Amino acid sequence: MEITTQQAGEAMRAVEQAGRQMRSKMIYHGVGQILILWGIIWAICFSIGQFVPKFTNWGWIIGNIIGISGTAWLGWLSQRSGPVVGESEKKLGRRLAWFWFSLFIFADIWLILLFPWHGRQLQIFIVTLIMFAYVVMGLWLEMRLMLWLGIVVTAFSVGGYIGLSYVLPGYLDLWMACMGGGAFLVSGVYLVRKWG
Amino acid sequence: MPSINKLIHEPARLKIAASLATLKNDMEVDFTFLQSQLKLTPGNLGAHIDRLEQAGYVRSRKTFIGRRPKTFLQLTVKGRRAYEDHVEALKEIIET
C-alpha cells in the first residue's frame, strides 16, 4: 500500500489527537466534580471565617469531613462508572489515596514542629501545601489543569496574605473564599463540561 | 522494516487503534465511551471492531454492570505490535 507524505502526516495528526483525547478523558474523568465540591467547601468555610469567625474551627472540621468523605465517594463512583477499567487504574487510585494520606500526616508533623503559629499563617500554610500537592499531581500525571490550578491558587493565597495585610487587613478569608473557592469552582465546571 | 497496515490505516480504525493503544495492557475501555469519543454510530464502531477482532488485533469482553450490559475493548499484543509498526511506517514516510 502506497501513501503520500501528506497522507502520512494527516494520519499521524489523527493518531496524536485520538491518543491525547483518550488520555485526557482517562485522567480527568470524575475530577471536575471533586473540584466543584472543594470549591463550594472553601467558599463556605472561608466565608464563615470572614463573617462569623467564632465558628471558623467548627466550619472547617465539618467542611473537611464532608470534603474528604465526598471525595472518597466521588472517587469510588468515578472508578465504578469510568470508561476505563483495569488493575493499573485501581492501583493508581490507591496510590493517590496513600499520597494524600501521607501528605496530611506530614502536614500534622510539620505543624507540631513549627508551633507556635498564628491563624493566618496556619491557613496559608495548609492552602499552599495542598496546592503543592496539586502541582506534584499535575507534573506526575501530566494534568496541565491541576498544575496551573496549583500555581494560580498559590499565587492568589501568598499574594493575598502579603498584599492584603497592607491594603485591606482583615479580608484574607473573603479573598480566599472568592479566589481560592472560585478557582476550584471554575476549574471543576470546566472539567465537567469538557471531560465529564 | 515496518510497513503500512491496510486494515489499520482506514481513518476510523486508525483512531480506534490509537485510542486503545494509550491504555496499558491490563486496561479495557467501554464501547459506548469509545463510540462517543470517536463520534461514530454503534453500528459503525461495531463493524470496525469486528474487522479488527477478526484480524486478532482487538479483544472484546461482554459483561453486566448492575443490570446494564457493557462491552469492554482492548488491543491484543498482536494488535499493539501491528499498530506500533504502522505508526513507525508513517513516521518513516514523513521523514523521507
Image (spheres, coloured by chain):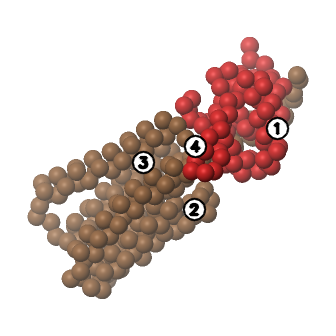
Chain colours: A brown, B red
Label 3 crowding class (10 Å Cα cut-off): few <14, some 14-19, many 20+? Answer: some
The amino acid type, in three-letter code, at marker 2 is: Val
Cα distance, mark 3 to mark 1? Answer: 39 Å
Q: Earlier in the sequence, mark 4 or mark 3?
A: 4
Circles 2 and 3 on the same subunit: yes
The chain under label 4 reads A
Query: Closer to the camera: disc 1 or disc 2?
Result: 1
Circles 1 and 4 on the same subunit: no
Cα distance, mark 1 to mark 4? Answer: 21 Å
The chain under label 1 reads B
The amino acid type, in three-letter code, at marker 4 is: Val
Q: Earlier in the sequence, mark 2 or mark 3?
A: 3
Question: Where does label 3 land, which residue?
Answer: A137
Q: What x and y, as percent, mark residue B32? A: 69, 48
Q: Are marks 1 and 4 in contact (CB under 8 Å)?
A: no
Q: Is residue A44 visible?
A: yes
The amino acid type, in three-letter code, at marker 1 is: Ala
Question: Where does label 2 land, which residue?
Answer: A192
Question: Which residue is situated farthest in the front direction here?
Answer: B67
Label 2 crowding class (10 Å Cα cut-off): few <14, some 14-19, many 20+? Answer: some
For image coordinates 23% across by 54% down, the residue present is A107
* Disc 3 secondary structure class: helix
Question: Where does label 4 land, which residue?
Answer: A84
For image coordinates 17% across by 52% down, the residue present is A109
* Disc 1 secondary structure class: helix
Question: Which residue is situated farthest in the top direction here?
Answer: B1
Cα distance, mark 4 to mark 3? Answer: 20 Å
* Position of B2 relative to B49 (above/below): above
Question: Where does label 1 land, which residue?
Answer: B47
* Position of A165 relative to B86 (above/below): below
